[in-house]
Amino acid sequence: MADLQYKIIVGLEIHVQLRTKSKMFCSCALEFGAEPNSRVCPVCLGMPGSLPVMNKQAFEYSVLAGLALNCNIPMFTKWDRKSYYYPDLPKNYQISQYDLPLSEKGFIEIPLESGETKRIRIIRAHLEEDAGKNVHSASSYSQVDLNRTGTPLLEIVTEPDMNSGAEVRALAVELQRLVRFIGVSEADMQKGHMRFEPNINMKIIRNGKEYRTPIAEVKNLNSFRALERSVTYEAQRQLSEFLETGIEFGMGNKTTRGWDDEKEMTVLQREKEEAHDYRYFPDPDLVPVELTQEWLDEIKSRLCELPLKKQLRYVQEYNLSDYDAGVLTADRATADFFDEVVNAGGDPKRVCNLLTQTGLKITKEKNCNITDLPVTPKGMADLAKMVDEGTISASSATTIFEAMVQTGKQPDVLASELNLVQKSDAGELESIVDQVIAENSEAVADVISGGKKEKKARGFLMGQVMQKSKGQANPKVVSEILAKKLK
Amino acid sequence: MAEKIDNEQVRKVAKLSRLELTDSEIEEFTGQLGAILEYVEKMNELDTETIEPLAHCLPVSNVFREDIAKESLGTEKTLANAPKKDETYFLVPKILDDNSGA
Ligand SMILES: [Zn+2]
């Protein structure tokens, strides 16, 4: 058996649809599911005499994303035409950016299963317009819908720094969280807001000699699952092909493959031949963009602590589990709310439990953000404090939280209204404990003798006290009194 | 002076542009394109050593509009000039080898 080692090498192109109200170069609305060809204007149609005008929001979103991806943002950027010969872009070119993209040379940190993070370099991120949709039917014609034509897309290109399907997936998931977090995209996979094109090949070392397999690009993947599986499949396919045929990088053209979701395999679409001859040239219809330091600083000021960094901080500083920290940082509204509650004096762990166990259940039911609920960070912090101080029990906190959502009242008010304030007054509790001790001599004897039955007997006495106090006794105080009396 | 454009290059450009040309058209366009390129070539005679490259011919930048959606044409008007259509779509000859998409 030959000595064989191999490594998967993957670079990724990602298209992210920006969260603007209107298109990139015209004022047509972006509306998912609208009647075909209803959101179309002369610019979309490429009519003679029509002129594109840049959407400022789309540009600023892109710069913000570039900053979040740790990119260098050049002060000068421009537009180019990329030749395109499909009917879903009637101009016969796509407006894109070629030699002067709006951001370049950045990186993104992705979480690995080991708990460590890995830095994936970003080559560039540029802005371009989307094409429409070609619908293939059984007839001898294809249908064309131009509603999507001109939608602002951020194209992000990574270096080939990923080495497994799982890493590629981790990058995609992290990027989704990132663009949602900074508010530049809804990144809704169901609506095609994120599309992936991995470039895959293998580095193989056989008997001390290094080989590389030809690169294949898998087109148009729009789910994390398909992305991960296609990479894993394609790598295995290339390895088998190499072992059978010995085909190496440079011996054939780069190929384009599609993903067959049902058969779970990649399928050859074409050899790339002259496809790369996009014949870019500067778009004379659009003037360049020049950033000023002031403008760039203003966009920079909209950046926030990024989700992965936040997640790691919650784990290190607050001792939250990685899972809980991930849940809290899944979207910015929740993370910001959590931060505010902690700043208002809520114990992070207590607040985390309240939010992840009760808060997110409520927001899921109501299909809203935590900030849409009539609960202030201060109210939430007070609720957490009441548990920590023993004023209410942890289970009562859930009840009060739900009542806060329903009524908008403060937790202390609700605690008394709902009769959930625990009795912590030692004098009052002591008389109940005395009563219980007098009535249960057998259990008292079991506790004092300290045998096998001690634990159970102690629990029983505790339960009796709770019952007598109608569940309102502070268990911590009761157990202290019990301990003192039954020494 | 750059190499003169030949039939092969015209054939390639035509293919990239999805144009089907006859041999006599290839011949004709090779001549025409050659003449145009020769004319443009004249510009290379200028000494541009000390001149900054230009990205756009107007000394203007940052022409933006606000992100406000306005009324579109609507399906009926959008399709009005289409050579072939159905209720809501343009109809085009069936696309084989579809590698469309941004
Ligand atoms: Zn339009």
Image (cartoon, grey):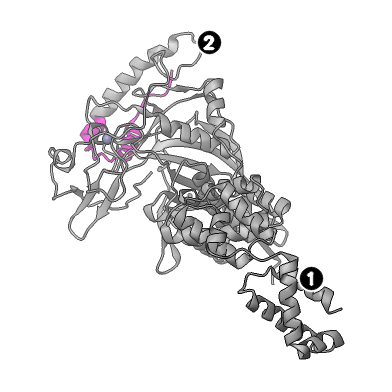
The chain under label 2 reads B
Of circles 2 and 1, the one toward us is 1
Q: In which quarter of the image is residue A471?
A: bottom right
The chain under label 1 reads A
User: Range of the magenta residues?
Assistant: B1-27
Task: Tell me the SS state at disc 2.
Answer: loop
Residue A146: give x, y in percent of width and height: 26, 43
Residue A196: give x, y in percent of width and height: 46, 51
Crowding at mark 1 (Cα within 10 Å: few <14, some 14-19, many 20+): few
Residue depicted at 52% across the width and 35% down the height: A64
Task: Tell me the SS state at disc 1.
Answer: helix
Residue A121: within the magenta?
no
Q: Distance between the residues labelled 2 and 1?
A: 90 Å
Label 2: which residue?
Answer: B49
**Residue A12 in view here:** no
User: So how many labels did they put on this image?
Assistant: 2
Residue depicted at 18% across the width and 40% down the height: B74
Residue A342: give x, y in percent of width and height: 64, 48
Q: What kind of residue is marked 2?
A: Glu
In the rendered image of this protein, does residue A337 appear above or below residue A165?
above
Quadrant housing the N terminus of chain A = bottom right
Residue depicted at 61% across the width and 41% down the height: A305
**Frontmost residue, A60 versus A385:** A385
Label annotation for residue A480: 1
Query: Is residue A13 toward the left or the right of residue A24 in the image?
Result: right
